[in-house]
Amino acid sequence: MSPLLHHFMDNFYDIIYFYILSFRKALDMLRCLHITAFARNLGYVGLLSAYFISPALADQPASLERLRADCLKREGSPAVVDACTKLLARTDVTQRQQIEALTYRGGSYQMLGNYDRALVDLTNAVDLWPDSAIPLINRAVTYQAKGDYKSALDDLNDAVKLDPNDKTARFERAVTYNFLGNSARAIAEYGEALRIDPVYWEAWYERGYTYHDRREYPHAIADYSQALTLNARSTEVLNSRGLAYLDSGDSKRALSDFNEALHLDPEMAAAWFNRGLLYLHEKNFDLAIADFGQSIKIDPTRAEPWYHRGRAFFEMGDGAQAQRDYNEAKRLSSEKDILWYADVAVNQETPPPPSAASVEAAPSIPKAVAVDDLSACRAAAGAGAIDACTRLVKSGAYHGETLAEIYINRGSAYYNADDLRAALADYSESIRIAPGIVTAWTNRADIYDTLGETEKAIADYGEAIKRDARNDEWWLSRGADYAEQEDYLNAIRDYSEAIRLNPDNGNAWYNRGIAYGMMENYDAAIADNNEAIRINPNDSEALSNRGLSYYRKGEFSPAIADLSKAISLDPSYVFAFHNRGLAYRDKGDYNRAIADFDRAIQLDPTDAAAWTNRSRTYMLAGKPDLAIADAEKAIELSPTWWRPWIDNGLAYEKKGNLDSAASSLSKAVQLSPDQLEVWQTRAAFRERRREFADALDDLRHAAQVAPDNKAIQDKISYLEAELQQ
């Protein structure tokens, strides 16, 4: 959404200033549905032993020592559960030892898959140690394992509040954001973990993985490389970096990483599989078959190696073996694409060796070209993606949610190609086919926003919220649309819900602060910007908006301090210079005010408001000639804006050129007869010239614009009395 400038004019003496209304929306708007075949499991088994420094055992009874040794093991086993249970039954254990036993027994239950029992133990640990982040983190990890990511996030938010510098809390919160599909926030949290501990190689790795999933391959490779600098023998990182190189088209480096991973761990099924994919991509089918075979030998329960080995056999012309591998893939997999391909293979005769003729004769056979279409379509970028998605749609082989996802991806490809109408049509078709997919609603809302159809965007975000009311980003985005319509009450309600769902959503605090400022609730605006700045101390826009709220309260010193900090963070920040100029001007420091307007004009010479405000500052400094020059420049830039005409008229009056003054003030009235200030300004000018009848006429027009303004009614009564004398 483009930044907007809102002008506040309360009375004759006010000067233009700006809230920075770049209402922020979801940071990571999903553009496509990416379904990976061999996704890394982000699950964790519990964070247990690292948190406790056990007291010395020498002075404890031998039976207690043995029980603690058997209990305090990071493993999921009935033996650990039994030892911890016996330990908890004793009367001679300390509170810390109770917490240890509950934590380790809960962790063991978690690893055994008994999440409900684990949560009971970990909740008891939380109750016994309420001022520590540690039991909250452990319970959050169990909620993750159970799939209850909202509860996990609640616990991790509480943990971060208790200890903002706990790197594990930050790390696990990043993991949870990834589970919730909010990769942008996950990246930010990994960054916080790395700020706390720059040698935390797992955080480098996980952030790299998140960048990888977002297809930001250079960032992913950089983070993987940093992780390897800290842990050079991590086969998992080598494997992941190899995939990133492969995805970015660097097969040579990818092969080197897969080779090194297999040198370190010849039993790593994933590395054999991924190297097989590389060979398959390069049409080296013999080597691909061999690597997929090794992956299957190590882990025969994964469908993907069977499926891709089937592809390789098919390309080699061995239809019978391809058929057998496809059948095994189908038996093992619930993946929709693999099931469909296997069904096609099962229901057709054994496919012949690939040839141009067979491709034409049997387009629905699971050939590499079909798989390539799936991959190209999911990329959601470029003409190739559009063509691939179109072929998948026309094949007639896809139905329901799978077909809807193809339309989403083609819509995203159209969006990336700036064909918004085609994107809109595809998102709408996806919604028609499968209205439960939230991504289609939010992507279509984003299109409507781009097209300026805010009402429709609001409606679509509403549909997304119906289906996923726990996603703070949808509330944030709809609130921004309400704010676009100047419906600040509804905007504040939506921002408040986003904050309730995610108290660390800095954009929600920022946007609500703007909305409060627009409603002239400056204390609330300052409080919200405080939170936005707490979350991101380098948020120059939040600093600028807080400074503006201080300015509106007449607190010029804190306003100048905030605006100066914003400028130090972004020396090209036009609005901050502009607003600081206003604060200096109202503080009576005209030289500094003029210097700030000079800089604002230098940064954006087309900004009529900066010329106008410098014009008025020159007037206050007793320099009417310079004021006239600036006002006339503003008129040149924005000839239909009433404000510079008023400033021009007042400057001419100051010089004694009353005819030019009258002409300029009348032009302002002509341009904006519904603007209170134009009538008030010309009425005051006519009164100073003792043209009481004309002044009275202007005030009566002003009273029509603001019928409840008692000051105008009093002034009318005064002039009427003057005319009767």
Image: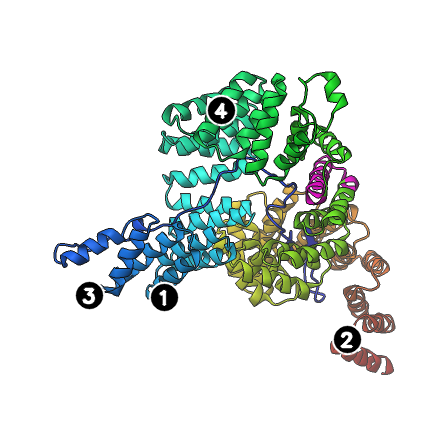
Q: Earlier in the sequence, mark 1 or mark 2?
A: 1
Q: Which mark is residue 92?
A: 3
Q: Earlier in the sequence, mark 2 or mark 3?
A: 3
Which element is circle 4 on? Answer: helix
Dominant SS type (magenta):
helix
Q: Nearer the viewer's eye, disc 2 or disc 3?
A: 3
Q: Position of residue 603 (x, y in %)?
A: 63, 42
Residue found 74% across the figure and 49% down from its top: 431
Q: Quadrant of residue 484?
A: bottom right
- Crowding at label 1, few (<14), some or many (≥20) Cα neighbours within 10 Å? few
Q: Position of residue 507 (x, y in %)?
A: 57, 54
Residue pointed to by mark 2: 712
The amino acid pointed to by label 4 is Gly
Magenta extent: 400-422
Separation of disc 1 and disc 2 at Cα? Answer: 64 Å
Look at the image and tell me whether residue 584 can be seen. no
Q: Which mark is residue 127?
A: 1
Q: Nearer the viewer's eye, disc 4 or disc 3?
A: 4
Quarter of the image with the C terminus in it: bottom right
The amino acid pointed to by label 3 is Asp
Q: Nearer the viewer's eye, disc 4 or disc 2?
A: 4
The answer to whether 477 appears left or right of 128 in the picture is right
* Label 1 close to label 2 by CB (< 8 Å): no
Residue pointed to by mark 4: 293
Q: Earlier in the sequence, mark 4 or mark 3?
A: 3
Separation of disc 4 and disc 1 at Cα? Answer: 51 Å
* Label 3 close to label 1 by CB (< 8 Å): no
Q: Nearer the viewer, residue 206 or 377?
A: 377
Which element is circle 3 on? Answer: loop
Q: Quadrant of residue 95?
A: bottom left
Q: Nearer the viewer's eye, disc 1 or disc 2?
A: 1
Q: Nearer the viewer, residue 709 or 209?
A: 209
